Image (cartoon, helix red, strand yellow):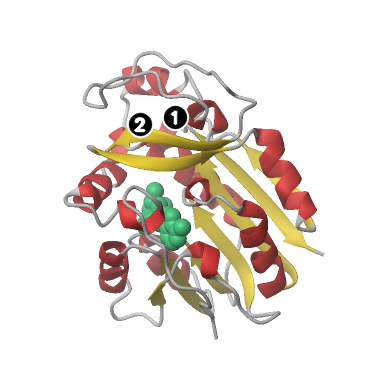
Amino acid sequence: MITSNTPREPGPGRGGAFYDAPQVMERYLQHRHSGVHSPNHVMEEPVLLDELGPVAGLRVLDLGCGDAVIGRTLLAAGCRSYLGIDGSTEMTRAATASLAGTSGRVERMDIEKFSAPPHTFDLIISRLALHYVDDLDAVLSACWSSLSPGGRLLITVVHPVITSHEARQSTKEARTNWVVDNYFHPGARQRNWLGNRVTWYHRTIEDYVTALTRADFALTSLRECAPRHDRFDGDTAEFARRQRVPLFLLLAGSRA
Ligand SMILES: C[S@@+](CC[C@H](N)C(=O)[O-])C[C@H]1O[C@@H](n2cnc3c(N)ncnc32)[C@H](O)[C@@H]1O
């Protein structure tokens, strides 16, 4: 159903290959599922769930699915099918384990190679994966083509305030200051993250909105994922720290 026409060109630090470097996936998943200390848990996920709406009966595609834990949640909520794709061998292994015993499926594939026939999906999600992609226009166009009329796209990315510039030398301590610089210079950024070098692509908020509308999506939501107080288990200091800067941007669009 889904086609991959061109050979993969993995490079260290790029896309899914980054997560296959020794210990990266373990460190990522540990951080990702660390409750109050996971920004995903306290900022990104609550807003994503707000925007998701009812999923019963929907055919869902997840681009850059990681360990696909969300797939289990969506299937339990009644979605008709869930397919996750991810470029990392390690992540697809973790996703296969998460989806065991469900009808959910996972394929190892680069997001840039994804295409599917019209009307294949009703909902496409992509959480924190599209800032690894250089040619966003091509990916959004493939998404639009594979959705049914009225189908929805829901994406989160690392916030442009964060992707613009990296000032800190070490990622060992909790961050206490941030610098926004080169904001209007879109393009590749090398980062130190999880003990390795990674390549992210910086775009402004306007770039993301323009890319969505250029791909013919009607923008239905733009959220900056403010921290959700009820997710902090009473840790007021951590809540105050997370109120300082945006970390995630959520965009949603629909296919007319
Ligand atoms: C930050 S993780 C997010 C994983 C998952 N969506 C979540 O929210 O837990 C980014 C994921 O995107 C995948 N990824 C990044 N670039 C990719 C690409 N170009 N093609 C396929 N997968 C990619 C990585 O392998 C990784 O699993």
Mark 1 sits on what residue?
A: 229
117 or 233: which is nearer to us?
A: 117
Left or right, residue 209 beside residue 242: right
Label 1–label 2 contact, CB within 8 A: yes
Q: Which residue is located at x 60 percent, y 37 percent? A: 203
Q: Is residue 76 above or below residue 24?
A: below
- Split into 4 quadrants, where in the image is the C terminus? bottom right
Q: Residue furthest bottom?
A: 1
Residue type indicated by callout 2: Phe
Q: Residue 114: horizontal and vertical position, in percent? A: 55, 71
Q: Is the residue marked by circle 2 packed among few (<14), some (14-19), or many (20+) residues within 10 Å? A: some
Q: Position of residue 184 (x, y in %)?
A: 65, 26
Residue 208 shown left or right of residue 95 in the figure: right
Q: Residue 185's x, y, as percent?
A: 61, 28
Can you tell which quarter of the image residue 232 is in? top left
| Quadrant of residue 124 within the rendered picture | bottom right
Q: CA distance from mark 1 to mark 2?
A: 6 Å
**Amino acid type of the residue tagged 1 in the rendering:** His
Q: Give the camera-side residue of 95 and 14.
A: 14
Look at 40% across and 75% down and name the residue there. 107
Residue 238: image x %, image y %? 34, 22
Residue identified by numbered label 2 = 232
Specify whether residue 159 is in view. Answer: yes
